[in-house]
Image (cartoon, grey):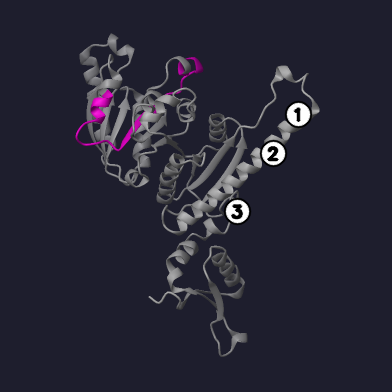
């Protein structure tokens, strides 16, 4: 390869060639136009777009994914998509790790990604409004405007970073758009999910050693407990590359109909994989009322149903002790063959129950460094 040698990457009509040249130059790739028929340029049927040979890999990624590089950040792609992945972000490293997974899933299934960032603007305290001066109210308005402009700037810079990583092949190519909103992050995520019904929410989390300090007020935990959209959590110490090679799943179940609904969703999402699924029975207090024989029958029934309905997966069954759920779960997670993913059905629960008896998904979130998929049922 001669780095500075010019090669033809495409031949277009003049009307199409000029915008492509501008796009390549905007992405810092030298490009020039030449008539195909140099002997009779006036009658030339097309125009060659020529680039340096060393720029060929980057140029091909741009041309193959032109809808990503040729639209504004907040515009929707005209290319039909098979659904949307919602990716809340705060532009941190662990959020970017989740982004890698979201783009990998989107590229695999022909979906788009929506980046969502929420900022909290200053709000005057209701009881102090009578004493407030016009100057203080104006200051609040100006602060809110500054926050909004800073948020837009951060999103623009982050979108440019994503395009650069797509261009260099660091993340898979998928169409994406962005949205910035004012509000508490967890409420903004839930509001967007209710309004737009994304296929999946992907969220980054911190490592287990840092989660305990953030137990109160965790955005991810609040979303998991309330959202009716499947959610994928990605710990900061897990690489997105390893998530694309999932082969062993711990599926927490209660031996009821909701388990079958959640398993069906898992089966459809990982349609291209042959997973080994360990059904982990998480007993509830009602199980104390049932005989051991009745519970054994329910376990065998679920196991037989899974093997018949989901032939691409292999299944085994384990049971936790009601008196030591977390300890037993940790012991299973530490076995010789590691699990790549935890799958948890999440039942719709009222506010009182969510506050005083957090879901098993919430509890596990703060104690595991394994990616988790929460499936509403």
The quadrant in which the C terminus is found is top left
Q: Which residue is mark 2?
A: 145
Q: Which class describes the residues within 10 Å of circle 3: few (<14), some (14-19), or many (20+)?
A: some
- Which of the marked residues, 1 or 2, is nearer the chain's N terminus? 1
Measured as percent of width and height from the top left, residue 168 is found at 44, 59
Foreground pick, 225 / 143: 143
Estimate the spatial distance between the alpha carbons at disc 2 and disc 3, rounded to whole Å.
22 Å
Say left or right for 290 vs 154: left
Q: Position of residue 311 (x, y in %)?
A: 26, 39
> 354 or 369, which lies in front?
369
Element on which disc 2 rests: helix
Q: Pointer 2 and pointer 3: residues touching (CB < 8 Å)?
A: no
Task: Describe residue 310's horizontal placement relative to residue 178 as left or right.
Answer: left
**Residue 178, located in which quarter of the rendered image?**
top right
Taking depth in this image into account, of 260 and 110 the one nearest to the observer is: 110
Pick the quarter of the image with the N terminus.
bottom left
Q: Earlier in the sequence, mark 3 or mark 1?
A: 3
Q: Nearer the viewer, mark 3 or mark 1?
A: 1
Mark 1, residues whose alpha carbon is within 10 Å: few (<14), some, or many (≥20)?
some
Res. 156 visible in picture = yes
Q: Which residues are magenta?
A: 329-354
Relative image position of residue 332 (x, y in whole percent): 24, 28
Q: Say which mark, if any, is on residue 168.
A: none
Q: Point out the tag, 2 or 3, that comes first from the N-terminus.
A: 3
What residue occupies the far bottom of the structure in this picture?
Answer: 39
Q: Which label sits on residue 137?
A: 1
Q: Which residue is label 3 attached to?
A: 72
Of badges 2 and 3, nearer the viewer stands 2
């Amino acid at each position: 390869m001669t780095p500075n040698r010019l090669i033809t990457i495409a031949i277009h009509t003049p009307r199409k060639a000029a915008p492509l040249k501008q796009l390549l130059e905007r992405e810092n790739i030298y490009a020039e136009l030449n008539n195909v028929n140099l002997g009779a340029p006036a009658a030339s049927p097309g125009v060659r777009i020529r680039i340096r040979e060393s720029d060929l890999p980057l140029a091909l990624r741009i041309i193959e994914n032109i809808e990503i590089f040729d639209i504004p950040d907040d515009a929707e792609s005209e290319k039909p998509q098979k659904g949307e992945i919602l990716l809340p972000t705060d532009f941190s490293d662990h959020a970017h790790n989740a982004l890698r997974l979201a783009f990998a899933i989107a590229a695999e299934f022909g979906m788009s990604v929506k980046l969502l960032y929420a900022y909290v603007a200053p709000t005057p305290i209701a009881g102090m409004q009578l004493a407030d001066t016009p100057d203080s109210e104006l200051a609040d308005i100006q602060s809110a405007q500054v926050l909004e402009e800073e948020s837009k700037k951060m999103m623009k810079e982050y979108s440019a970073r994503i395009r650069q990583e797509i261009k260099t092949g660091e993340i898979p190519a998928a169409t994406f758009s962005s949205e910035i909103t004012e509000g508490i992050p967890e409420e903004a995520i839930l509001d967007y999910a209710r309004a737009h019904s994304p296929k999946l929410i992907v969220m980054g989390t911190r490592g287990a050693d840092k989660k305990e300090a953030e137990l109160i007020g965790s955005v991810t935990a609040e979303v998991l407990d309330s959202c009716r959209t499947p959610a994928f959590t990605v710990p900061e110490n897990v690489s997105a590359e390893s998530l694309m090679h999932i082969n062993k799943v711990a599926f927490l179940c209660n031996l009821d109909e909701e388990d079958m609904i959640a398993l069906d969703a898992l089966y459809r999402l990982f349609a291209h994989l042959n997973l080994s699924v360990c059904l982990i029975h998480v007993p509830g207090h009602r199980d104390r009322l049932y005989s051991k024989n009745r519970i054994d029958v329910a376990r065998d029934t679920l196991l037989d149903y899974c093997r018949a309905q989901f032939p691409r997966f292999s299944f085994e069954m384990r049971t936790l002790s009601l008196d030591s759920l977390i300890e037993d779960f940790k012991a299973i997670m530490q076995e010789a063959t590691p699990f790549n993913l935890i799958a948890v059905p999440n039942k719709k629960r009222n506010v009182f129950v969510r506050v005083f008896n957090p879901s098993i998904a919430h509890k596990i979130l703060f104690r595991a460094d394994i990616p988790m998929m929460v499936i509403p049922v």
